[in-house]
Structures are given as C-alpha cells and as structure tokens.
Image (cartoon, rainbow, N blue to C red):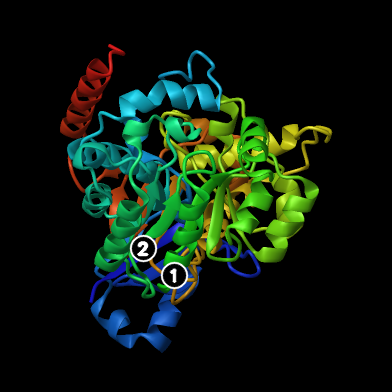
Amino acid sequence: MTTLLVKNADILVTMNESRQEIPGGAILAEDNRIVWVGPTSNLDRWLAEQRPDLHRNGIDTVINAAGCVLLPGLVNCHHHLYQTLTRTIGTGDGKILFDWLKFLYPIWAELTPEAVYVSAKVGITELVMSGCTTVADHLYLYPNGSKIDDEIRAAQEVGVRFHPTRGSISLGESQDGLPPDRVCDSEPDIIKDCIRAIETFHDPEPLSMLRIGVAPCSPFSVTTDLMRESAELARQYPLVNLHTHLAETKDEDRFCLEMFGKRPIDYAESVNWAGEDVWFAHMVHPSSGDVDWLARTQSGVCHCPSSNMILASGIAPVREMVDKGVRVALGVDGSASNDGNHMLGEARQAMLLQRVGWPGFESRADRFTAREALELATLGGARVLRRNDIGVLQPGMAADFVAFRVDDLPHAGGLADPVASLLTCAPGQVWLSVINGRPVVEDGHFLPFELPPLIETHNRISRQMMTRAGVL
C-alpha cells in the first residue's frame, strides 16, 4: 500500500456534482484510488480522526502544488495515433477530408507493427504532457502484419489509461468506397480479430486500465453488413463500446444519400448504432432533429475542433448538443489532421470555436465558457466512455489527476481566475500527472523513459514510409 499527497494547490477543480472548486486544495491517494479531497488546512484533522495510521506513520510521497491548478486528468475520446508519422502532409496545402484521405492512404499502407508501436508511443507521450490521462484510439488500418496489440504495448509502457478501438476498413474503391482495396480487410477476418482483441485484452472491471472498443471506420469505408455485425458483436461483452466517424463533412452527407438513400444519422439508426454504448467522432453537420435523436438515444459525440478547422469540415453545434443533453467529449483526432496532440489546447479550441458560432448562428463571446470546455475534456469524456471511475476528483475515484502551473510567464496577471486562465491564456504543458496513483510527469519532466531515442526512431520510420510511398 502506497500513499501520495498533493497539497497547497491554488485551486483544486473537482468536477463533482456541485462543480466544487477548493482554494488551497489537496488530494490524497492510496494505491490507485482517491481517499480524500479538501482544503490542505483540513487534512491533519481528517488524518487524526479517520486515518490514525497515516497520521502516525506519515505519507509516502508529498508534492507541493503551490502555484498550480489541480484538476481531473483530461480524457481524449478520439485519435489515430499512427498518424504522428505523417504530420503536415496535405494539411499545409489545405486539402479537405476526402482528398486528404486519398492522398494519405498509400503512405499509411506502408505501416508495420514497429511503426504502429512507435507512433502510438510518441502520440500518447505527447498527450500525457498536455494533461491527458485517458486515451481512446481508433486504429482501422492493419497492413503488413500490424495488430492492435502493437499500440496496446506502447500505452502500457507509457502508463496511460487506454481505450483502443479495433477499427476496420472493408469497402474499397472497387466497391465504390473511398480507400484503396489494398488497405481493406475481409469482413470475416475483421470480426475474428475483434473477438480476439476483446477476449485477450478487454477489462470491464472498475479502475480498468484497458478496455477494447469495436470501430468500423466510417459509412464510406465499410459495408452495411459489417456495421450491423459489429454492433451485435460488441453487445455480447460488458462495456465494449462502439465507435465510428459520422456526419463529419457535407461530402459524407452526399455519399450516404447516394449509397444508402439516407443521411448519416438515419443510416446509423438503420444499422442499430444508437445508445449509451455508441459514440460518434465529429458530428459536424447534424440537423436539429439529429441532435434531438442523439439526446433521446443517449448516443455520445466526440468533438474534434482543430481537425475540423484544418480540414475545413465545419463547426459542430456543440452548444446546441450540450443544451439538449447530448453526451459530448473532446478529441484531438489524428496527428495528421491536427497536427498535434495537446488536449488542453483542444479544450481551448472548443471554447473559441463555439464562440465564433456555426452556420445560421451569430458569434457570441458568452456562448461557451472555459469551465464548460474543461468539463467536456474531463467529465464529458468519462461519460462518453461509460466510465464512472474517472473525470471527477472525489473519494473512491481513480487516482488520475493533473496540475498546471499558473504562476509562470504565460499566466502572469491571470490571478482573477486561475481556472479560466488554463484556456484563455496560452495552453501549457502539464507540471504534474498522476495516472492510476503513479506519477508519470513530475516538475514538468516525463518519467517513464527518455524521449530523444524515441523521437529519433519515430522520425526514421516516418522517412522510410514516405520514401517507400514516393513522397520523399
């Protein structure tokens, strides 16, 4: 049994039911659970009354978080980690989604098991340094012997709480799909490997560090049969979620109407993709009726503002979705359509983009607050992933929490509202990250392993892939 105390935080943001914020806050963890949260000044009395063993023997590790805002670890609900290998390709030139995908598929066809492993390790590390403690990834390409196992190994070496989804592509160009045939897999093989991944790795228990999802890539890259079979398969196992891209662009609207005779949401409903076990990435172009359907069915949404901006996909009506009770989370999306992995920065983009507004709505600075954006990045992500053990700092929850400095140069003068300053000022790197009760970042330093050798290996693999694909 080990104990960890973080004390004297300028503000501790609990995200509990009353959204309590505690000046001079402290948090005490025992092994991988939180056992106490409150003002630092109250800790000694609580220990004397409730835990005389700790009061007498002392706490193993004590960290002074003065000058920091302490909050739940951020939750990234949509990513393509392998795309760290192809950052800036097409995004600098301004390609839109379908053109960008067609340009990149031949490069991604060069992925190997080592490439999947190393890229995941790079992307997850970058996410952790931005305050992320839980990562959901969507890996839908498996060329040259690659497996979901490769990115799981990377996540375990970093120490992050991981929700990898076994994605799939089966509808190639020869069947009027978008991807080239050579990156597609047969549907029987896809289902077989989904079963293998779930039965090998999925852990539905509380405080689980690893849960598998099932994730056909999109309506334009898999068949209707695979969408239905994936839903049936996932629902045979506890807490196996379903994930896909939906309503990301106007092109997708046109594709679904031409291919299925239905708009994206209607198509999702027709293949039984609705409910609390489902979450959709993007949801940029729902109608008001679609938003009502999302709320009524309790289907989740992951908003990816930076990716939607870079690919000119549009502005998702997050304000309307939140107001109508839709479960909404945040994601950085692929590292080749962002081109970064900064969760705190993504929360800032979400806040700003909703203030700008979306088609048919005027711009308003009061449309979305900093705290609402932080809630999407913490509690919102936990809800979308069906986790009742993360996203909130209170006793019994997982010991996943992060601290950002607010006494540094970028936050100078932000004393009036240190919590809001995390987003209104330039988003910083995390100063402290504790995942499952274990410090992963301390005093701004990443602890699990050295970064330069990883970056060097990653860039070597990236160059090799692009050379084989004829890009370099």
| Relative to 302, 64 lies left or right | left
Q: Is 39 on the left or on the right of 192, as rendered?
A: right
Observer-nearest of 192 and 364: 192
Residue 211: assigned label? 2
Pointer 2: residues within 10 angstroms few (<14), some, or many (20+)? many
Q: Is residue 109 left or right of residue 429?
A: left
In the image, taking residue 106 as reference, residue 379 lies left or right, namely right
> What residue appears at the point 41 percent right and 46 percent down from the top-left corner?
138
Q: From what the image shows, is residue 171 above or below residue 198?
A: above
Residue 130 found in image quarter: top left
Amino acid at dot 2: Arg
- Residue 356 drawn at (x, y percent): 73, 32
Considering every residue shown, the one lying at the far front of the view is 174
- Give residue 140's position: percent from left, percent from top: 37, 43
Secondary structure beneath label 1? loop
Give the amino acid type for the residue marked by disc 1 in the picture.
Answer: Leu
Q: Can residue 414 be spotted in the picture?
A: no
The picture places residue 65, in percent across and down from the top left corner, at 41, 53
